[in-house]
Amino acid sequence: MTKGYFISIEGPDGAGKTTITEMVKEQLETEGYNVVHTREPGGIAIAEQIRAVILDPKNTKMDARTEALLYAAARRQHLVEKVLPALEMGKIVLCDRFVDSSIAYQGFARGIGIEEVWSINQFAIENAMPQLTLYFDIAPERGLQRINQNKGREVNRLDLEDLQFHQKVYEGYEIVRKQSSNRIQTVNADASVEKVFEQTMDIVRKALQNKD
């Protein structure tokens, strides 16, 4: 696909993805890799503006299909402006969320349909899928508990959804994991930061050693 290596990081809200991914970036850089850590929706100016619209707690009237289309639009711009150029330069891209999130959240939890959401994202990404996806596995109840305990964390519109919605997201991810078991590696996120980091680095190192 490209000269670099594309890794996406997935999981329910409160899984600790951002913290661990930053640690992985720092570790890989000490080992001599050139790494880009980015996020979805966001990562570049246009996509960050779309993120602000999607996640604004005041936007309670947002239709589920509108939400899915906005995610796909932000993803497209982020991909062509940041991710693909970085990969072409031979960098490792660590992306906090990608298409799997849309399938779990909008496709399954919102009830739009997995195939429907996959279809609009195929149009957006033109087959540019990650070579590896790290799935941070944590029960919805534990993830929401962490969010409530983390007073400094951004609270967005999706965080305000009830437990039933987050349970549906978790079910959606289970479907995605089964469908893409060759790409998705699971990390037990309900452990100490040190253990989660260790698990993650083991998976990443093996993947990078085997990429060529």
Image (cartoon, helix red, strand yellow):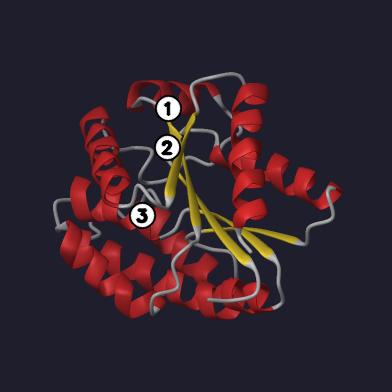
**Label 1 with label 3: CB-CB less than 8 Å:** no
Closer to us: 109 or 54: 109
Position of 36 compared to 126: left or right?
A: right
> As shown in the figure, which amino acid type bears the numbered disc 3?
Asp
Q: Residue at x 26, y 28 (%)?
A: 163
Q: Position of residue 55 (x, y in %)?
A: 41, 53
**Can you identify the residue that label 3 sits on?**
100
Q: Position of residue 162 (x, y in %)?
A: 26, 32
Q: Residue at x 22, y 37 (%)?
A: 168
> Which mark identifies residue 13?
2
> As shown in the figure, which amino acid type bears the numbered disc 1?
Gly
**Label 1 with label 2: CB-CB less than 8 Å:** yes
Q: Secondary structure at mark 1?
A: helix
The crowding category of the residue bearing disc 2, from other C-alpha atoms within 10 Å (few below 14, some 14 to 19, many at least 20), is many
Q: Residue at x 21, y 31 (%)?
A: 164
Position of 90 compared to 191: left or right?
A: right
Position of 27 compared to 181: left or right?
A: right
Residue 89, quarter of picture: bottom right
> As shown in the figure, which amino acid type bears the numbered disc 2?
Asp
Work out how far the residue at label 1 is from the one at label 3, CA to CA, in angstroms. Answer: 18 Å
Q: Position of residue 25 (x, y in %)?
A: 72, 49
- Classify 57 as above or below 52: above
Position of 158 compared to 117: left or right?
A: right
**Can you identify the residue that label 1 sits on?**
143
Closer to us: 74 or 200: 200
Labels 1, 3: front one? 3
Closer to us: 175 or 55: 175
The crowding category of the residue bearing disc 3, from other C-alpha atoms within 10 Å (few below 14, some 14 to 19, many at least 20), is many
